[in-house]
């Protein structure tokens, strides 16, 4: 493998702003004429400060920041704007000329500063952007901003896995990270973007990123780099004073999950650890560490001899891996592919240990049925690393390529052989589940390809309902089927059902809604390009609208489009707004996907 090397200076460059387009529009809208501002809350590290920084970029804005060290010093946060000796009224007068004020880490403000912010909100002449962290104690004057209806509140959720992948892709500078690495980073960071950046930088510095064979992507295999920032975030874990608690945590770190009834797990110690939110006991009585970052940190800090005593080898993972494979297979058979934990397989892949081909093929099939095509291909490649001729892994890799629109690659992977006439799904394990339906051979493929009559009498459950709704050209029924498929985890199938509903609907408004849902789901399916999705069209766009949409899909800003077409920026914005309405698209992010569809056309 090739080790990743990069000039350290590149690590200091800001990462792209990704995944918050709707929130950014909302925050900017709160600063428009007649508005008084907004409060932004969310978990630590989720990107609140970056969001508001983007929102006020280019604006005349005063900024104050609360800090732990100064929260007992009067007007400490406003020291550069008002004298410390000023009264509340005097401080307010000093700020009379400030039209836009950004208050970051408002939960750390001293009481006088918090009261001043509240007074500014009451008066309403200064627009306020106030940022606080969820779970932290907040001064009463700050919490009354939203509880007293002075300002609206926007609660940021952590970035999804898909959004995390987009962020990492933009930050990699052309060096894409493979899906299992993206999943690992998302799982470890849980939406903490500062931790995400720190882990990526640490992996680069330590040469832990390697180029995968037969792939243009980089992968992170091996240990978690225990950087200074990682240690700071896990200090409460590493500084446990009780030897019994530390021993219990380390046992879990090297062999979780462990059964609660295991004699070596002292119940009293587990109760203390559970009270401190360090361990979790599930409904089956299995004990795990609460945060996925804790295990790697404890393993790194254990020392060589202790690690040798506590570690399980890849060979010892066999029974647990078999149990995971059996559960994945059972879920496929029951037509329920909602996300489930697979810690043993993920641990093997993360360590770079061989993954048995049988497990890898089932894991790939599970991911593919969920519409996670790049992840499915990654698992299939893991199985082929040690078993290059395994037919199940090769088939899964080919199907992932075919559903991504790369039919030549699929034929190459299969050596030119045909499998069921180029079947779209081929989930051969799913048969006769009483509550889920039957995905036998090509029957459901026929429905997805638009020929429901070929599946007559061969499907049950939601899949039979899909065939019947398509046969009747019943748009509302197809949308209902799509909703149930989405609930069961079949995101790609749900996107296809919504896409079929677009043509079945007689009501143009309902068709636009179905198109929006199809696009939204398809964007989560990692590059899916299937026949049903290719039926989505760009709608009734004028030639000029189509021209502008094409340029916007290519990544050009409104100003760049205006310069290229010799139009005003306002005209470009108006055309895009009209195009969004006709396409049922909510933002620019949907445009590349729509424009890239093979059958896309304007009326």
Image: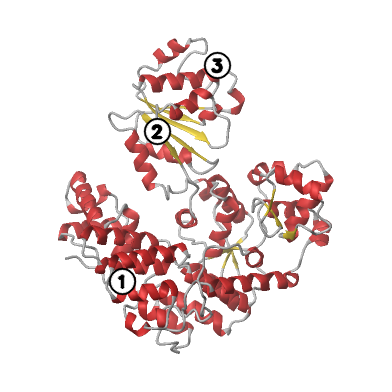
Mark 2 vs 1, N-terminal side = 2
Residue 3 is situated, as x and y percent measured from the top left of the image, at 60, 64
**Tag 2, which secondary structure?**
loop
Crowd tier of the residue under label 2, counting other residues whose Cα lies within 10 Å: few below 14, some 14–19, many 20 or above: some
Residue 15 is situated, as x and y percent measured from the top left of the image, at 47, 48
Mark 2 vs 3, N-terminal side = 3
* Residue located beneath label 1 in the image: 534
The Cα atoms of the two marked residues, 2 and 1, are separated by 41 Å
**Looking at the image, can residue 300 be seen?**
yes
Viewed as shown, does residue 571 lie left or right of 126?
left
The residue closer to the viewer here, 140 or 311, is 140
The Cα atoms of the two marked residues, 2 and 3, are separated by 27 Å
The residue closer to the viewer here, 219 or 584, is 584
> Image point 35% across, 40% down: which residue?
26
- Residue 487, quarter of picture: bottom left
The residue closer to the viewer here, 534 or 100, is 534
Vertical side of 67 occupied by 417: above or below: below
* Residue located beneath label 3 in the image: 74
Q: Point out the image quarter for the C terminus.
A: bottom left
Viewed as shown, does residue 27 lie left or right of 165?
left
**Tag 3, which secondary structure?**
loop
Vertical side of 484 occupied by 135: above or below: above
């Amino acid at each position: 493998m090739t080790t990743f090397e990069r000039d350290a200076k590149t690590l200091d460059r800001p990462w792209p702003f990704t995944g918050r387009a709707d929130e950014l529009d909302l925050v900017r809208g709160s600063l428009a004429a007649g508005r008084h501002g907004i409060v932004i809350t969310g978990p630590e590290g989720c990107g609140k400060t970056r969001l508001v920084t983007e929102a006020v970029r280019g604006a005349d804005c005063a900024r104050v920041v609360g800090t732990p060290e100064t929260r007992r010093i009067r007007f400490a946060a406003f020291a550069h704007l008002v004298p410390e000796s000023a009264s509340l009224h005097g401080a307010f007068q000093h700020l009379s000329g400030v039209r836009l004020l950004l208050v970051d880490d408002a939960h750390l403000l001293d009481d006088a500063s918090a009261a001043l912010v509240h007074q500014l909100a009451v008066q309403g002449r200064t627009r306020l952007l106030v940022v606080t962290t969820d779970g932290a104690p907040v001064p009463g004057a700050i919490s009354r901003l939203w509880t007293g209806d002075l300002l609206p509140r926007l609660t940021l959720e952590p970035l999804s896995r898909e959004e995390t992948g987009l962020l990492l892709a933009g930050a990699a500078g052309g060096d894409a990270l493979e899906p299992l690495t993206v999943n690992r980073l998302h799982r470890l960071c849980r939406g903490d973007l500062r931790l995400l950046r720190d882990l990526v930088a640490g992996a680069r510095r330590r040469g832990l990123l390697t180029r995968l064979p037969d792939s243009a992507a980089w992968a992170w295999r091996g240990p978690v780099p225990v950087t200074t920032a990682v240690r700071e975030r896990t200090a409460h874990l590493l500084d446990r004073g009780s030897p019994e608690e530390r021993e219990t945590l380390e046992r879990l770190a090297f062999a979780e999950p462990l059964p609660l009834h295991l004699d070596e797990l002292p119940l009293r110690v587990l109760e203390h650890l559970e009270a401190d939110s360090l361990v979790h006991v599930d409904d089956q009585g299995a004990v795990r560490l609460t945060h996925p970052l804790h295990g790697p940190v404890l393993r790194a800090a254990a020392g060589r001899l202790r690690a040798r005593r506590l570690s399980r080898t890849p060979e010892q993972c066999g029974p647990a891996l078999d149990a995971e494979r059996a559960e994945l297979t059972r879920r496929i058979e029951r037509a329920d592919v909602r996300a489930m934990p697979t810690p043993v397989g993920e641990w093997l892949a993360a360590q770079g240990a061989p993954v048995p081909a049988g497990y890898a093929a089932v894991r790939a099939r599970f991911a593919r049925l969920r519409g996670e095509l790049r992840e499915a291909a990654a698992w299939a490649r893991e199985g082929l690393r040690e078993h290059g001729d395994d037919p199940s892994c090769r088939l899964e890799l080919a199907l992932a390529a075919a559903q991504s629109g790369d039919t030549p690659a699929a034929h190459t992977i299969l050596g030119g052989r045909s499998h069921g006439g180029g079947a779209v799904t081929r989930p051969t394990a799913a048969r006769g589940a009483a509550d889920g339906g039957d995905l036998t051979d090509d029957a459901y493929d026929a429905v997805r390809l638009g020929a429901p009559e070929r599946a007559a009498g061969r499907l049950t459950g939601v899949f039979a309902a899909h065939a019947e709704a398509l046969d009747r050209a019943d748009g509302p029924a197809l949308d209902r089927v799509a909703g149930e498929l989405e609930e069961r985890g079949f995101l790609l199938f749900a996107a296809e059902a919504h896409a079929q509903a677009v043509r079945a609907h007689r009501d143009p408004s309902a068709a636009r809604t179905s198109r929006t849902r199809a696009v939204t789901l398809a964007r989560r399916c990692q590059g899916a390009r299937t026949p049903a999705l290719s039926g989505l069209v760009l709608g009734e766009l004028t030639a000029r609208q189509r021209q502008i949409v094409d340029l916007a899909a290519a990544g050009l800003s409104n100003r760049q489009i205006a310069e290229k077409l010799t139009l005003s920026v306002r005209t470009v914005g108006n055309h895009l707004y009209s195009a969004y309405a006709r396409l049922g698209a909510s933002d620019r992010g949907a445009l590349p996907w729509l424009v890239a569809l093979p059958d896309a056309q304007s009326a």
